Image (cartoon, rainbow, N blue to C red):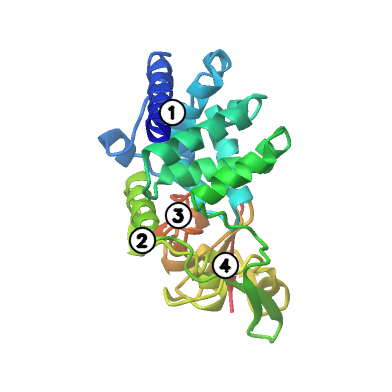
């Protein structure tokens, strides 16, 4: 009898989710462009991508919270959430570029909607999915916790789903130091691999789909990030996660320069408005600015990629160039 009751509850969960999705699809609001299309491949910069995925804000405010969440999960650039140095930083970045998420965070029922959707996702799917990761990051965000009255329920559901939340500082991670060329100690974290094989494959594939004009170099991993790759050890065998690379720039180990013609493989780029670092791979030409340089960089938990500097998850305005 108990087993039958449980199955009935599961069916109701799934039915409710399907009804919600159906309502969202009938709302008349959708993205004008999607991944795997010729139109998407033609986009050459992050700025163009964001513009192409804008929604009518006046129509957004008329949608239910469930419909808004469906649009967040369908957002073509949702993968950007995992390209930053912490879970919160990723949510903040996505909120800035996603009109649907920005509106969703204004809703008082947002915590309940996320919590319910997470329960449904756990019931209908035992496998690791990007949707679970997205829901988990949203549930753990400061935006949700400031209005949530169900913090214990949220933590319980996140634990059930075995969700990975990468934060700037975590007591579960060990820390050590690396040295700049001039001997300044820089704190780094030893995270190890937190991604399951399924998560890794899905993050790899969606990154390739979202940024088809970038070249995939090495798989998604939580072992190292962009700053560690660019300033400490430019290798996919790197095992350190570095949150703050500024010591390399202020102790004289690297010096800033402005003539883009002089940029070469020893040049490091720092995205002042994107908290991102990259290694120059090829010059963009005498008339091109730093944003046109071809670089190699690690995208947070996402793969190591080769790309034009302005074609990535990060704000490429205010890029500075550095050399030893």
Residue bearing the label numbered 2: 197
Residue bearing the label numbered 4: 227
Residue bearing the label numbered 3: 292
Residue 38, located in which quarter of the rendered image? top left
3D distance between C-alphas at marks 1 and 4: 47 Å
The quarter in which the C terminus is drawn is: bottom right
Callout 2 crowding tier (Cα within 10 Å): few <14, some 14–19, many ≥20: few
* Percent coordinates x, y for residue 166 in the rendering: 57, 57
Mark 3 residue element:
helix
Q: Nearer the viewer, mark 2 or mark 3?
A: 2
- Residue under the point 48% across and 58% down: 299
Q: Is residue 154 visible?
A: yes
3D distance between C-alphas at marks 2 and 1: 31 Å
Mark 1 residue element:
helix
Q: Nearer the viewer, mark 3 or mark 4?
A: 4
The label number, if any, that marks residue 9 in the structure image: 1
Q: Which circle's residue, 1 or 4, is located before the other in the chain?
A: 1
Taking the view exactly as shown, the residue that stands out farthest to the front is: 1
Residue 53, located in which quarter of the rendered image? top left
Say left or right for 175 vs 115. right
The quarter in which the N terminus is drawn is: top left
Q: Is residue 74 visible?
A: no
3D distance between C-alphas at marks 3 and 4: 20 Å
Q: Which circle's residue, 3 or 4, is located before the other in the chain?
A: 4
The vertical placement of 177 against 224, above or below, is: below
* Percent coordinates x, y for residue 174 in the rendering: 63, 74
3D distance between C-alphas at marks 2 and 3: 34 Å
The vertical placement of 304 against 234, above or below, is: above
3D distance between C-alphas at marks 4 and 2: 24 Å
């Amino acid at each position: 009898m108990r087993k039958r009751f449980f199955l009935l509850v599961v069916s109701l969960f799934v039915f409710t989710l399907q009804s919600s999705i159906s309502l969202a699809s009938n709302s008349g609001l959708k993205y004008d462009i999607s991944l795997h299309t010729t139109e998407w491949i033609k986009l050459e910069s992050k700025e163009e991508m964001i513009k192409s995925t804008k929604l009518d804000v006046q129509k957004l405010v008329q949608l239910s919270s469930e419909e808004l969440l469906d649009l967040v999960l369908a957002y073509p650039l949702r993968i950007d959430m995992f390209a930053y140095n912490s879970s919160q930083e990723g949510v903040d970045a996505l909120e800035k570029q996603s009109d649907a998420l920005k509106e969703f965070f204004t809703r008082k029922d947002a915590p309940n909607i996320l919590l319910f959707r997470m329960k449904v996702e756990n019931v209908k799917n035992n496998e690791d999915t990007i949707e679970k990761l997205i829901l988990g990051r949203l549930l753990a965000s400061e935006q949700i916790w400031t209005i949530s009255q169900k913090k214990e329920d949220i933590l319980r559901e996140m634990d059930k789903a075995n969700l990975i939340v990468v934060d700037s500082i975590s007591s579960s991670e060990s820390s050590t130091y690396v040295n700049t060329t001039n001997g300044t100690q820089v704190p780094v974290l030893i995270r190890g691999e937190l991604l399951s094989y399924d998560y890794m494959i899905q993050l790899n594939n969606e990154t390739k789909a979202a940024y088809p004009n970038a070249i995939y170099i090495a798989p998604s991993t939580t072992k190292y990030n962009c700053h560690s790759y660019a300033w400490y050890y430019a290798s996919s065998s790197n095992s350190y996660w570095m949150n703050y690379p500024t010591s390399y720039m202020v102790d004289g180990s690297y010096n800033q320069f402005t003539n883009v013609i002089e940029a070469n493989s020893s040049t490091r780029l720092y995205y002042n408005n994107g908290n991102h670092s990259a290694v120059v791979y090829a010059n963009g030409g005498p008339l091109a600015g730093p944003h046109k340089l071809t670089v190699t960089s690690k995208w947070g938990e996402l793969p190591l990629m080769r790309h034009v500097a302005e074609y990535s998850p990060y704000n490429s305005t205010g890029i500075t160039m550095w050399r030893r």
